[in-house]
Amino acid sequence: MPPIDELTILVPVDVSDEPPALDILDVLSPLEVVLLGYFPVPDQAEPALIKDEYEAEAEARLVDVAGGRPDLTEVLVFTHDREATIDRVADQYDCDAVLAPGAVTEIERVLVPIRGDVNLERIISVTARLLEATGATVTLFHSVTEDADESYGEFLLRGATDRLEEFGVDEERVSWELSAEGDPSQEIVDLGNEFDIVVLGESEPSLRERIIGDVLSHVVDDLESPALIVRDTE
């Protein structure tokens, strides 16, 4: 069984206004969590001036979200560019994944959509660590597009299942589902809302494109469940 490295998750939160409570931080407590409080700065304004005016208020909000949890790393940034800041801080703290929070108080069922073999090893590694920390079960999912070979989807799912078992995940905790409906992003949203968290993989060369790109942005925005976006750092 290959070793499972420590899993570090970046959790960005907008502290320019009162942020929502993040109960999921309690669920993630066995993991390394970097809580990024970002304060958007208008293009025409100087970040240093905005920081001077709002730093105390923003810091108080970040501390409130952290809720005295001792193992969090807290970072406060005033920025013109949210996505670039997320990318930079994720690199700085060697984060494996970025969390788009949702309303959840426990993680018992994990959905992992697999689109192809890009970034697949990291997705499986992060999923294995998440399962180790939470004791959850996982469903691997692949949606076959109209021009794709269904046997390839089954090959991906069976291979991912075997890889999770190699990481030490009991086979009884792993299931997979293959769909031929032909609308992968909508299927992920519909199915994902039945799960406690959805693990998604980046497939572009920059986090900015992966988070706000057309497909992944649609999925993350429409999900009610939190999404854990696995970074492709190769």
Image: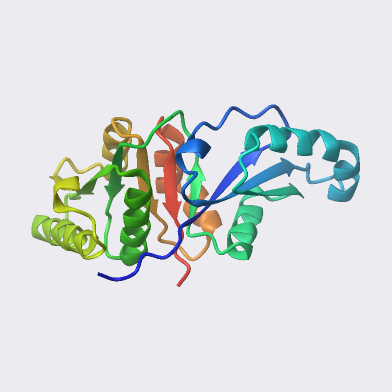
Residue at point 42%, 65% (across, down): 5
Q: How many marks?
A: 0
- The reply to whether residue 176 is visible in this rendering is no
Residue at point 26%, 34% (across, down): 191
Q: Where is residue 107? Give x, y as percent.
A: 36, 37
The extreme left residue here reads: 151
Q: Nearer the viewer, residue 208 or 123?
A: 123
Q: Nearer the viewer, residue 2 or 49?
A: 2
Q: Nearer the viewer, residue 25 or 226?
A: 25
Q: Is residue 8 left or right of residue 61?
A: left
Residue at point 64%, 61% (across, down): 88
Q: Is residue 100 above or below residue 167?
A: above
- The reply to whether residue 103 is visible in this rendering is yes
Q: Is residue 18 above or below residue 63?
A: above
Q: Is residue 108 left or right of residue 34?
A: left
Q: Where is residue 19? Give x, y as percent.
A: 64, 29
Q: Where is residue 70? Give x, y as percent.
A: 62, 44
**Quadrant into which the N terminus falls:** bottom left
Residue at point 62%, 39% (across, down): 13
Q: Where is residue 163? Give x, y as percent.
A: 22, 64
Q: Nearer the viewer, residue 6 or 94?
A: 6
**Quadrant into which the C terminus falls:** bottom left
